Image (cartoon, grey):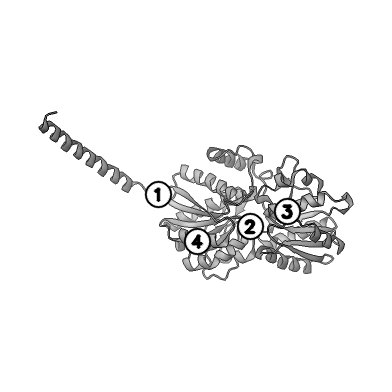
């Protein structure tokens, strides 16, 4: 090749590459930066499906919001996930990392109340906006923060226990035994149960037994409560320990199998698979705030269509952890409205906007409005229901 031609060719190529790089840089600079939402959940915990349920609900809502133009004049929502594996120290580190992320508006939590309770001081010091779509301990919202950066669209223990005891009372099971996890979540429920019994004449807690996480047998504690006169067991457990109890109770003679009324931690994992055929041999019901089977069919179809674009979900039966999914879906839509109202990704501005939103009809209910300055709980007693597992594993509303 002629050296002069080669030199001219290289200079021209260099100019073209420079122009291309500048054009690319300008295009990137012109593109609106995404608005980030975080999930701090128990993704890596064996048999747990709760963080994945929250993620499914958020991604379905994000797909709808982005298809409608995003927020703040065309900025897309994007999700950032972090795994705390149900270990509080990991959760605290995750919150610290989220708090330092430019463009991150809020963090959504997972199932485990004890992790979130340990994270509260970090949330307070970093002024990180926290959305709770599953965890139920009262202290998560009743945290003493001024202003309070925590908003919940989920069950609350001080509502759960009265509803569980009401269900027992309707069945004339007025002597109950409490079987509780030895954590802040269990203690929250113990306090709520004592208050609920005091307000209901005729009901009595005959005993309270505590178990530890990963206990491999609960039958001894169950027998203590039965021998104390319990007609029913009110259970606060996650999927692993609840499955152990169900298998052990199913192995007893039928006359010794007491009805079990459960908090909803069991719905956040592979409880049905772990309990196996024993589940159909035990009178087992679980509290819920929502059922896809009772929701507005048009809204369910819309959700399934959105979920189907980003996951393998095609039917209601495909949804694991339905309450976590539905809560996260509505809560993401509500947060997007607050971002629009704030006109900014500033966390304080969005926090304030959450308290000033108008009424909105979501998948779960008509929020009128979702939150107020005095109320950071989006759900109340009217949403509560009891559900049972069908033989195919689907969780459906129970007849009471």
Q: Residue at x 55, y 40 (%)?
A: 311
Which image quarter is the N terminus in?
top left
Q: Are marks 1 and 3 in contact (CB under 8 Å)?
A: no
Q: Position of residue 359 (x, y in %)?
A: 56, 54
Q: Circle 1: is it few (<14), some (14-19), or many (20+) Cα within 10 Å? A: few
Which of disc 1 and disc 2 is earlier in sequence? 1
Q: Nearer the viewer, mark 2 or mark 4?
A: 4
Residue linked to disc 4: 93
Q: From what the image shows, is residue 285 above or below residue 354?
A: above
Q: Position of residue 123 (x, y in %)?
A: 51, 65
Q: Position of residue 78 (x, y in %)?
A: 46, 48
* Disc on res. 340: none
- Res 78 visible: yes
What distance separates the C-alpha of mark 3 from that of mark 4?
A: 30 Å
Q: Secondary structure at mark 1?
A: loop
On the rendered structure, is 135 left or right of 352?
Answer: right
Residue linked to disc 3: 242
- Res 384 visible: no
Q: Residue at x 65, y 49 (%)?
A: 269
Which of disc 1 and disc 4 is earlier in sequence? 1
* Disc on res. 73: 1
In the orientation shown, which residue stands out farthest toward the left? 4
Residue linked to disc 2: 379
Q: Secondary structure at mark 2?
A: loop
What distance separates the C-alpha of mark 2 from that of mark 1?
A: 30 Å
Q: Circle 4: is it few (<14), some (14-19), or many (20+) Cα within 10 Å? A: some
């Amino acid at each position: 090749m002629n050296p002069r031609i080669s030199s001219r060719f290289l200079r021209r190529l260099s100019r073209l590459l420079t122009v291309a790089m500048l054009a690319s840089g300008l295009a990137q600079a012109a593109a609106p930066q995404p608005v980030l939402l975080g999930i701090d959940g128990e993704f890596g915990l064996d048999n747990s499906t709760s963080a994945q349920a929250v993620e499914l609900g958020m991604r379905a809502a994000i797909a709808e919001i982005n298809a409608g133009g995003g927020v703040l004049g065309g900025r897309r929502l994007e999700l950032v996930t972090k795994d705390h594996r149900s270990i509080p120290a990991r959760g605290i580190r995750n919150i610290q990392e989220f708090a330092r992320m430019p463009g991150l508006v809020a963090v959504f939590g997972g199932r485990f109340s004890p992790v979130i309770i340990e994270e509260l001081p970090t949330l307070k010091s970093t002024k990180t906006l926290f959305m709770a779509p599953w965890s139920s301990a009262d202290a998560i919202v009743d945290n003493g923060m001024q202003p309070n950066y925590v908003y919940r669209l989920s069950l609350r223990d001080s509502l759960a226990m009265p509803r569980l005891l009401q269900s027992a009372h309707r069945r004339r099971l007025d002597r109950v035994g409490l079987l509780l996890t030895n954590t802040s979540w269990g203690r929250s429920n113990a306090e709520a149960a004592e208050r609920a019994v005091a307000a209901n004449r005729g009901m009595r807690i005959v005993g309270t037994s505590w178990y530890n996480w990963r206990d491999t047998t609960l039958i001894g504690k169950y027998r203590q409560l039965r021998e104390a006169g319990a007609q029913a067991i009110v259970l606060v457990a996650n999927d692993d320990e609840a499955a152990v109890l169900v298998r052990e109770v199913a192995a007893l003679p039928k006359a010794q199998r007491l009805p079990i009324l459960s908090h909803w931690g069991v719905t956040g994992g592979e409880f049905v698979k772990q309990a196996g055929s024993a589940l159909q041999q035990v009178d087992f019901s679980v509290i819920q705030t929502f059922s896809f089977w009772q929701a507005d069919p048009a809204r369910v179809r819309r959700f399934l269509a959105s979920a189907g674009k980003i996951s393998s979900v095609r039917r209601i039966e495909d949804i694991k952890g339905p309450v976590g999914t539905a809560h996260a879906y509505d809560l993401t839509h509500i947060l997007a409205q607050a971002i629009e109202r704030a006109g900014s990704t500033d966390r304080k501005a969005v926090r304030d906007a959450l308290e000033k939103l108008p009424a909105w009809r979501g998948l779960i209910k008509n929020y009128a409005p979702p939150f107020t300055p005095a109320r950071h709980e989006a759900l109340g007693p009217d949403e509560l229901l009891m559900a049972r597992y069908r033989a195919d594993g689907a969780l459906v509303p129970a007849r009471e």
